[in-house]
Image: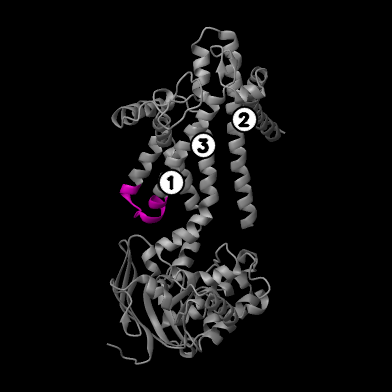
Amino acid sequence: MKKRFSQRIGFGILWLCMAATLFFLGSIIYFIVVRGAGVFSWQFLTDVPRKSMTAGGVAPAIAGTVYLTMGAMVFALPLGIACAIYLNEYSPRGFIVNIIRMSINNLAGVPSVVFGLFGLALFVKSFKFGVSILSGSLTLGILVLPLIISAAQEALMAVPQSLREASLALGATHWQTIKRIVLPNALSGILTGAILSIGRIAGETAPILFTAATFYNRGFPKSIFDEAMALPYHIYALMTEGTHPDQQTAIAYGCALILLLLVLAISASAIIIRQRQRRFHA
Amino acid sequence: MHEKMNAKMEAREINFYYGAVRALKNINMSITGNTVTAIIGPSGCGKSTFIRLLNRMHELVAGSRVEGHVYLDGKDILDPTIDAVDVRRSVGMVFQKPNPFPKTIFENISYGLTVNNVRDKDYIEAKVVESLKKAALWDEVKDRLKDNALRLSGGQQQRLCIARCLAVGPEVLLFDEPCASLDPISTGKIEELMLELKKNYTIVIVTHNMQQAARVSDTTGFFLMGELIEFGKTQDIFTAPKNKQTEAYITGRFG
């Protein structure tokens, strides 16, 4: 009886923890949807901000977020995958590689505002890209590099060693083996990791604070050297600046809802890709 | 340089190290062409290490080091000026667990050709059919060459791996415990196949199965703790072993 009782208590505690987590998650979503849905309309998604940010839409911010994340991925994805291939397939295993790995992991732990300062110093000032989509994308790209590298490395490690051996034993070169056996088999894992990291950088505020974001744009950015509005920064700006806090707060929640939906959609597509790949390999 | 004129492969004074551990000690072995040579011995005796040397697969293990020579038709394949890629084209390998690529049956066989820059489609197709026939798999898969190779049974997968090897046109085939994960019927088919293949190829097989060694091989080598204890005609090894340790092992008293 005593054994059963303690098991019940144990399970009860586990259940409570799970319920608490779900409660917080659910209430965040509920909160944002309830407060944000009010301003949601076709105009909100497609129009530019009007009447000092109290009416109109947030289309430039949506576009800015899309540009910034896409720019970051264009930069970080090839670089990150190449790094992962080097670390996993080419580098001799040993002390130095362990240090590189540790550094990459540490890079992932650096606060994002530090990346923002770094981007300001390097891209905005030294490279003279100015506060622009380019600077912001590069900064976000560096922020997301460690995530992409470790996701790609995990995917590469999941490719069975026996396939590499089979390929090499057939007289394939190391490079042919990577290109034709390792990469195709790791691709879905790499893509899943990449897509999930898109979700991560779409919501980043600090790195673009000094490098790309602007509170208000009359229209859409015209080149990569233009500043851009972005959803996360727009939320921050709406909540801290301006003269019509009531209307602005509603719009901020609307922006949060868009951001939430964007990230959910991105995660969902990652799950779909993973499932498809699993079906093929079964 | 060679005592036997008809040695297809010859290992001379091989010492092998994993870091500081000496895994092979002064191995000398000559492998006659168109025969099956079985390598037996308890786990960890160095037999897999030895067979992987024969097509330079040992290079994949970081921190390993080899001394000595392995001759293929009189040419030292361990010579660093010789490309391992070329060696592996002449000396193919079939592994313990069937490891087909997650590609179609056809692509599995053609892979070895395309990585060696064969582009002629008709030639590739003919080679695929020929290799599958040689590996006694053609009748079972001829209508499903576009199927994923992973849908084949374990035994079929292993014969596919053999066919994949044959397509490249090797002269020597190395089998590293090829039946370890197969049922007796599939094992029987692979053994039959080996006897057929030795007409055109030289075969070296590592096996834990004494009966298998006795059934398929002409020559047997017994490894123990990195040393080649006894090497001779299979019949002699199994009926009248000269060494006490060999006798103890094949009669099942240890290992």
**Chain letter of disc 2 in the image:** A
Q: Nearer the viewer, residue B53 or B229?
A: B53
| Quadrant of the image containing the N terminus of chain B | bottom left
Position of residue B32 measured from the top left corner of the image (x, y, whole percent): 41, 88
Q: Hey, what amino acid is under mark 1? A: Pro
* Alpha-carbon span between mark 1 and mark 2: 27 Å
**Crowd around label 2: few <14 · some 14–19 · many ≥20 (10 Å):** few
Q: Hey, what amino acid is under mark 3? A: Ile
* Residue of label 1: A78
Magenta-span inclusion, residue A87: yes
Q: Are marks 3 and 1 in contact (CB under 8 Å)?
A: no
* Residue of label 2: A261
Q: Are marks 3 and 2 in contact (CB under 8 Å)?
A: no
Q: Which callout, 3 or 2, points at the residue further toward the start of the chain?
A: 3
Q: Nearer the viewer, residue A72 or A29?
A: A72
* Secondary structure under the numbered disc 3 in the rendered image: helix
Residues tagged by mark 3 and mark 2 found on one chain of the structure: yes
Give the magenta part as a residue range: A85-97
Position of residue B179 measured from the top left corner of the image (x, y, whole percent): 56, 73
Is A130 on the left-hand or right-hand side of B99? left
**Crowd around label 1: few <14 · some 14–19 · many ≥20 (10 Å):** some
Residue that protrudes farthest toward the top in the picture: A243
Examine the rendered structure and indicate whether residue A221 appears above or below residue B55.
above
Residue at the location (40% across, 30% down)? A225
* Residue of label 3: A198
Q: Which callout, 1 or 2, points at the residue further toward the start of the chain?
A: 1
Q: Name the dominant secondary structure of the magenta segment.
A: helix
Position of residue A231 measured from the top left corner of the image (x, y, whole percent): 53, 24
Magenta-span inclusion, residue A37: no
